[in-house]
Every structure is written in structure tokens, then in C-alpha cells.
Amino acid sequence: MVRPTLLFLFALLGVAWSQSSDDVAREVQRLKTQVDEERRAISTDSSRQAEWRSQSLARVGSMRDDSRRLVRERDSLRQALDRESKPKPPPPVPVAPATLRKKAFAQALAREVDRTIPLLAAELDGGTELKERWTVLANGLRSGSENPEDALGTFLDELSERIDLGSRIQARAGNRTDASGRVVRGTWIDVGASLQVFSGRDGSAAQKSPSGTREVANPALSSAIARSAKVLSGEDPPGWVRLPIGPEAGK
């Protein structure tokens, strides 16, 4: 009776031990599964944390850029406000159309004086002084220091005088005493009222001006003056004449 009872107890203990081993195995497997899930969760959280950190840094950088932009806009607006708050100079006085026409006329007259200077200033004695006066006149017209109406009158008067002076050329018989005291017969050619050229019958020539009388030493110029005297006095047929008047005539 005792033996069957012991066998039964051993059987019960075996069943119980078998069940305990299965429970332990299941518990261990559950714990492993839970650990794996925790690891995956930790890995996922780490990735999310890294992504969140990256996004946070990007947002911080964007906020800094916005802050700098706002500072620049603030400074720009402050400067614009300072400029607007400063007193503005009064607007320029409108120029009357008559003033504009007067200025344009003065500039045009200055250009005309410039074009005329090389044409007439060096033709007769006194051309250097005339060139200086007209140059000052043209500069005054450009700068506005010369009244264009007065300047026009001065320019036209001197231009007319210059043309008249150059057009009054006549030949007349006369004598001249040379440097040795010898009286030479010949022809005087009067050029306006400021210059005379003498052509002697002996082939000599001289030029007389307000600055004095000079002998013409160049034979070619003496011959040209003699030819001009004959044409002007009617001894030779009419034609173009060349009077070598100016500083070079005595050379």
C-alpha cells in the first residue's frame, strides 16, 4: 500500500516539475522578447532624438538668420527715418525760358568767336591782341560773366573794323628814305590804316607799321611785293596779289 502511494507522489512531483520547467522557459522567452522590444524602442527613440536634435539645430539657425535680417531691416528703416526727418533743401528755382535762350545764345556766340579767331586774328598787325580779346570774350560767354548782347555788339564792331581794314588796300606813287639816307622812288601800298608796304623801283622793299619800318630782305618776298604794286597801280593786268604782311615780311 505504501509503495503505490510513493509512486503516485513521484508521478505528481514529476508532473509538477515538468510544468515548472515549461513556465520558466516561457518566462525566459517572454523576458527576451521584452528586452528585444525595449532595445528596438531605445533604438527608435535614439533615432527620433537625433532627428529632433537636427531639426532643432536647423530651426535655431533659421531663427538666427531671421534675427540678423530683422536687425538689418531695423537699421535700414532707422536710417530712412533719419533721412526723412532731416530738413530738406529748398527746391531749385525754376529757370525761365528766356534765361535758357539767353544762355544758349551765349554758348553759340562763343563757338562763333572761336571759329572766327583763326580766320582774321593773324591776318594784319595787331592780330595777337585781337586774338587775346576774343579769347577772353568767348570764355566770358561760356562762364556767364559776359552779357551776350554786349559781347555780340563788341564782336561785330571789331569784326567789321577788321574786314574794313583788310579791304582798304590802295597803291600810290611815293618815295622812301632807306637806312643809308638814300631816297628811293617807288610805290606805297596802303593796307587799311595800320600798315604800309613799299616797293622800290630798284627792287627793294620795306614794311611800315605802328611798330616801325623794316627792310624786306627776302628776294622772293620783295618780288611778290613788286608784282602786287604793279597790279594795284594798273601797270600789270588784274589778278590775285600776295602781300607778305606780318612778322615774317622782314625776314
Image (spheres, rainbow, N blue to C red):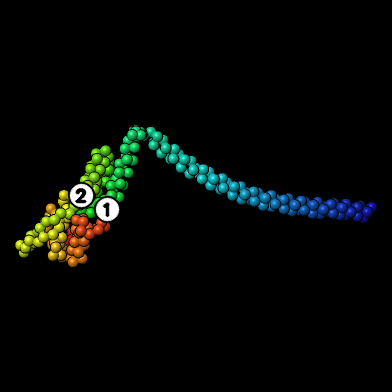
Query: Disc 1 residue type?
Result: Pro
Taking depth in this image into account, of 192 and 173 the one nearest to the observer is: 173
Residue at image location 59% in from the left, 49% down from the top: 54
Q: For mark 2, give the secondary structure.
A: loop
How crowded pointer 2 is (Cα within 10 Å; few <14, some 14-19, many 20+) is rated as few
The answer to whether residue 132 shows anywhere in this view is no
Q: Where's residue 66, x and y in %?
A: 51, 43
Q: For mark 1, give the secondary structure.
A: helix
Pointer 2 residue: 168
Q: Nearer the viewer, mark 2 or mark 1?
A: 2
How crowded pointer 1 is (Cα within 10 Å; few <14, some 14-19, many 20+) is rated as few
- Asked which quadrant contains residue 245, the reply is bottom left
Residue at image location 84% in from the left, 54% down from the top: 18
Residue at image location 64% in from the left, 48% down from the top: 48
Q: Where's residue 228, x and y in %?
A: 21, 59
Quarter placement of the C terminus: bottom left
Q: Where's residue 5, x and y in %?
A: 91, 52
Pointer 1 residue: 118
Identity of the residue furthest to the bottom in this view: 219
Between discs 2 and 1, the one toward the N terminus: 1
Query: Disc 2 residue type?
Result: Arg
CB under 8 Å between callouts 2 and 1? no
- The Cα–Cα distance between marks 2 and 1, rounded to whole angstroms, is 21 Å
Q: Where's residue 1, x and y in %?
A: 94, 52
